[in-house]
Amino acid sequence: MRKVVVLASGNGSLLQALIDAPERGNQYEIVAVVSDKPKCFAIERARQAGITEIAISFQKSQDNQWQQHLKDTVLGFNPDLVVSAGFMRIIRSDLFEVVPTINSHPSLLPNFPGAHAVADALAAGVEKTGATVHFIDAGVDSGKILAQQSVPVYPNDSVQSLHERIKMVERIQLTQVVVKLCLQEDIWAGLH
Ligand code: GAR
């Protein structure tokens, strides 16, 4: 069984999908949830599921130390895979070179990278946006794409309604990618 560390910052509904997937406990074990926000609901979801949770409060003035602390904490669990599921920080260490690290992003990358992907898509007036799972690399939402699905934008959509429609796709897509990678003999193989 593969060991997975999940990174999350907010509500944690993607984390919940990974917790609830029937494959958990079979293909993968979530060995820890690590967050930059001690009070986020993702931490509470981990607690309720009996999963080890660790919050490392982000301090802008100490970004380098924070990055190192995050890396050391994650590696301390000896994971096979790291999953960024609503983690709103850029990983600036080389963590993703040591352990395969993937991210779910709420747009059809390479369109609308960054922290405001849903609002940016809405402001651009596109007819469709979507959800992407990709390997994390040194750029911002620029790593190799593993899966992508489009989601329609409706004329009366708000950022919230559109984001919720995207997240419904993300929850399924991210779980499928995690299971697929965990079944691979070499998780890195997905990167080549
Ligand atoms: C998801 O839409 C995820 O793609 C996004 O945050 C949301 C988390 O939802 N992540 C990013 O935008 C990262 N750039 P959740 O807290 O309900 O799981």
Image: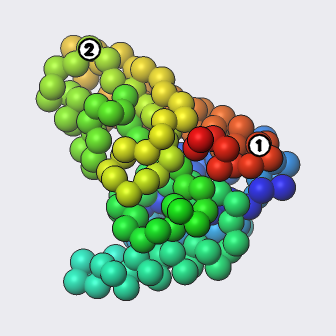
Q: Is residue 165 left or right of residue 124?
A: right
Q: Is the residue marked 1 within 8 Å of ligand 1, measured from its CB?
A: no
Name the residue tied to disc 2: 127
The residue sitting at 56% across, 79% down in the picture is 73
Q: Position of residue 117 (x, y in %)?
A: 27, 39
Answer with mark 1 or mark 2, whichever residue precedes in sequence.
2
Residue 4, picture quadrant: bottom right
Q: Determine the CA span between mark 1 and mark 2.
A: 35 Å
The quarter of the image holding the C terminus is: top right
Observer-nearest of 44 and 192 = 192
Observer-nearest of 149 and 96 = 96
Q: Could you classify mark 1 by the number of other residues whose Cα lies within 10 Å: few (under 14), some (14-19), or many (20 or more)? A: few
Name the residue tied to disc 1: 184
Up-down relation of residue 41 to residue 58 (above or below): above
Up-down relation of residue 115 to residue 109 (above or below): below
Residue 93, picture quadrant: bottom left
The residue sitting at 32% across, 28% down in the picture is 162
Amino acid type at mark 2 = Glu
Asked whether residue 41 is in view, the answer is yes
Amino acid type at mark 1 = Gln
